[in-house]
Image (tube, helix red, strand yellow):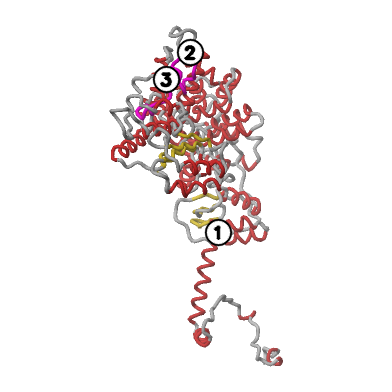
Amino acid sequence: MDDLAPTPRSDGTDAEYRVLARKYRPATFEDLVGQEPMVQTLRNAFETGRIAQAWMLTGVRGVGKTTTARILARGLNYEIPGEIDRPTVHLDKPGVHCEAIMNGRHVDVIEMDAASHTGIDDIREITEAARYRPASARYKVYIIDEVHMLSKSAFNGLLKTLEEPPEHVKFIFATTEIRKVPVTVLSRCQRFDLRRIDADDIVGLLRRIAQSEAMAVSDEALALIARAGEGSARDSLSLLDQAMAHGAGTHGETEIGAETVRAMLGLADRARVIDLFTHLMKGDAAAAMAEFKAQYAVGADPVVVLSDLAEFTHLVTRLKIVPQAGEEASVTETERLRGRELADKLSLRLLSRSWQILLKGIAEVQAAPKPNLAADMVLVRLAYAADLPDPEEALKLLREGKASDLAAALPANPGAPTGGGSPQAHSPDQAPAQSAPAAVDAASPPAAPQASAAPEADPAPRRFQALAGGGGNGGASATAPYPAPRLVPQPEPVVALGSLADCAELARKKSDLHLLFMIEHQMRLVNFVPGRIEFQPTEKADPDLAGKLGRMLTEWTGMRWIVSVSRSQGRPTLHEERTANRHQLLSDAKSEPTVAALLSVFPGAKVVDVRIQEAEDMTPPLDMAPDETETDPDM
């Protein structure tokens, strides 16, 4: 689309204004942006004469499905008297039928909206009319948009004609819901998945159209529009149309800048979003809440703010892994410079955790009755979690006897400002030496006598007790703020448990059948010591199994239990062990001489169960006399 020109009007005038999405609608295959694989396939098919009888075009809204269908119909019926008289993809000059086809008014190119023509009667009209040859064009082309909305009977009525259409009939279907189209229809079509258009391609398209319209639009504004368009050319052109009406005066005199687009879309200032992100990565919850309040006061949507934070988190992560990602046209200069600076200082662990918190927080804010309050809580959670080590890493440090390293990794007060420095990849050597004890003293009520006798040199175990136990995925929560607790001695357990089978039996006694099922069917035990269980979950295990088991065992036994997920291979589940033992018992029973003899005497007989009874519980044989059963054992 280097020589971009508006699509000509059918009446030859240009007096009435047309929106940009219609004015610059592609008219040739070369004009299609971002669909090169499909264009190459069609070019080869037309040049070799291997033209299909039906095509299925699918993709998100605004990527050009209907436009592609019209261009395809134009190529099928392309004709210039004395020059070209065959289907082609090279549509350099307007042909005999081109204008009527592109304007949707050609008698032999029938466009039907399946949303309003869903029944079998509409399809019956198509199948009846398909028998007759086209009036003037080479092919009679049926374009059915949103084909997934046809009824089941309509699809069935179309199958026969679609499978063996007359030589002069072609079908082109378009849909945004390809999964709703029956397989019987898909198997009769050539399918083309129209891709979302890359942001760079959309920026280039918008720039060329703005130049054609003699409007000055900044590159940052174009990048914002392309990002808001989400891969849709039509959406992006509609936003550009709106921006031109919103922010520009006369042609070329006023540049449409990023501020105009932000005000139009209700977006927060990108630089302020980055400032908010920086406060959060420092763990400065107070500054983050103040910045969000200021953005909310000027009209920023809480969901949009969190979405922008998530998008910037993704950008920083990409810049850390692929530094060249900053050269994309959709990335502004501010994002590029500050994103690279943050990518050098933040760890992948922190970025990944931030992404998870934001992803969950966006859904919470969308469902909250007061989104601004919910967004505040998400930001607090994110700031407090910025310095926390992963549960697995914390357990590893404790097992290796590196409690001092764990104490250094845990912040004394994650919500306090850190002095305005740049965020760092939180390493142990950056924590103040006295931060952990200070946090314990400040946050604790008057200490009990037992706590006063505790050593102050290694506070990591008691800090970790607040971090571990409860919560899913290993019994540790790395995303929630935590207080610094007092050192409280563990009480003696009310119920002593020595194996996973004991845990299952305790759940049975407590009538918690759901937990009993999970213990027996979903846990492959790796290690069991009183107070700590490590297991490998099965594929269908409940994601909150570790957290629920830890909470219930702590409640039932009177002592703290830490239940964690391990990556090591565990032993078979209790259910699998019982099943294996039962199979072994059945095999042993079948090989027992008496049973084997019975099985040979009664063909088709099977051993279906084996019951083992203790000697004192065994009943006497049926043929034993009553007086023999009551014999005095002393005789």
Quadrant of the frame with the C terminus:
bottom right
User: In the depicted view, which residue is nearer to us: 181 or 131?
Assistant: 131
Chief secondary structure of the magenta span? Answer: loop
Task: Please tell me the numbered disc located at residue 222.
Answer: none
The disc, 2 or 1, on the residue closer to the chain's N-terminal end is 2
Q: Which amino acid type is marked by label 2?
A: Ala
| Label whose residue precedes the other's in the sequence (1 or 3) | 3
Calculate the distance from the C-alpha at mark 1 to the C-alpha at mark 3. Answer: 69 Å
Up-down relation of residue 261 to residue 564 (above or below) = above
Q: Residue at x 43, y 34 (%)?
A: 135
Residue 471: give x, y in percent of width and height: 58, 44
Residue in view at x 41 percent, y 30 percent: 197
Where does the image place residue 35, in percent across and percent down from the top left?
A: 38, 33
What secondary structure is found at the residue carrying circle 1? helix
User: How far is disc 2 from disc 1 in space, using C-alphas?
Assistant: 74 Å
Q: Earlier in the sequence, mark 2 or mark 3?
A: 3
Q: CA distance from mark 2 to mark 3?
A: 12 Å
Q: How many marks?
A: 3
- Where does the magenta region start and end? 6-32
Q: Which residue is mark 1?
A: 521
Residue 318 is a magenta residue: no
Element type where label 3 sits in the image: loop
Circles 1 and 3 in contact, beta carbons < 8 Å: no
Binning the other alpha carbons within 10 Å of mark 2 as few (below 14), some (14 to 19) or many (20 upward) gives: few
Q: Which mark is residue 15?
A: 2
Name the residue beneath numbered marker 3.
8
Name the residue nearer the viewer: 315 or 525: 315
